[in-house]
Amino acid sequence: MTKLVYPAGATPLDPDEERGLLLTHITTRGELNRWEQDNIVEALAWLEKTRPSDILNEPFIRTLHYRMFKAVWSWAGEFRHSDKNIGGSWHQIPMALRELCGDAQLWLQLKEESPDLIAVRFHHRLVTVHAFPNGNGRHARLMADLLLTNILKRPVFTWGGKANLSEPGEIRTRYIEALHSADKLNYALLLRFARS
C-alpha cells in the first residue's frame, strides 16, 4: 500500500496499524474507503437481521467495529495500542467506555434530555474516546443511530445528508467544527449537523 493521505481532522495510522491491512492490492485512500464502505454495508445487513438492543457495553462496541471493518483490517474490533492526537491514553480505553456506557444508561433512565441530545452526546464521547486505530467516526455515528432506532425508537440522524464524511470537503469541515464545539460542551452545532 502506498502512503495514505488523510483528510483534515483524521487520525493517521501508525506503521504497525497500516501493516494490518488485509487487502494488499489497495494503493489509494479512495480504494481503501470503497472497501471499507463495502464492509460497512455488510455490517448494516447484519444489524438489520439481528436488531440488537443491548448495545451500551464494551463487547457490543467491539463487535460492531469488527463487523464494520473485519474484511479490511486485521485489528478490526481491537482497541488501539498507541496514543493518538485524540483520545486519552490507550490504556484507559476500557475504563472510558464503561464510564460512557454507564452515563448513557443513566441519561436514558433520567429522561431529562431529548433523544437527539442523548444520541449526540453519546456519539461525541465515543469519538473522543477514540477506541480503535481507524473508523472511529463512522463507528460512533452508527452507534448513535442504533441508540436512536433500537433503544429510543426514533429515526436515525442524516449526518449532513449522508455525505461521505471520510472525504475532504465542506460537509466534513462542518462535522469537525461541530465536534470541536461539542468539546466545549456546546452541542448545538452537532445537533444541527446530525439532523441536516
Image (tube, rainbow, N blue to C red):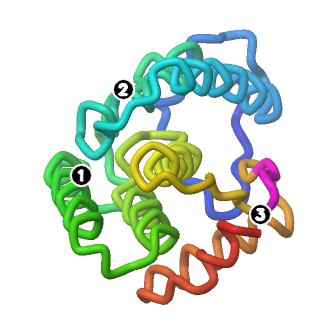
Magenta: main secondary structure equals loop
Residue type, mark 1 in image: Leu
Give me the C-alpha separation between circle 3 and circle 1.
Answer: 26 Å
Residue 97 horizontal side relative to residue 161, left or right:
left
Mark pair 2, 1: CA separation: 14 Å
**Residue density around tag 1, few if under 14, some if 14–19, many if 20 or more, within 10 Å:** many
Residue that numbered label 2 is attached to: 63
Report the residue marked by disc 3: 160
* Label pair 2/1, CB-CB below 8 angstroms: no
> How many numbered marks appear?
3
Q: Residues within 10 Å of mark 3 (few under 14, many from 20)?
A: some
| Residue occupied by mark 1 | 97
Disc nearer the start of the sequence (3/1): 1
Among the two numbered marks 2 and 1 on one chain, the one whose residue lies closer to the N terminus: 2
Q: Residue drawn at (37%, 65%), measured in percent from left and top?
A: 125
Quarter that holds the C terminus:
bottom right
Task: Tell me where residue 177 sits by quadrant.
Answer: bottom right
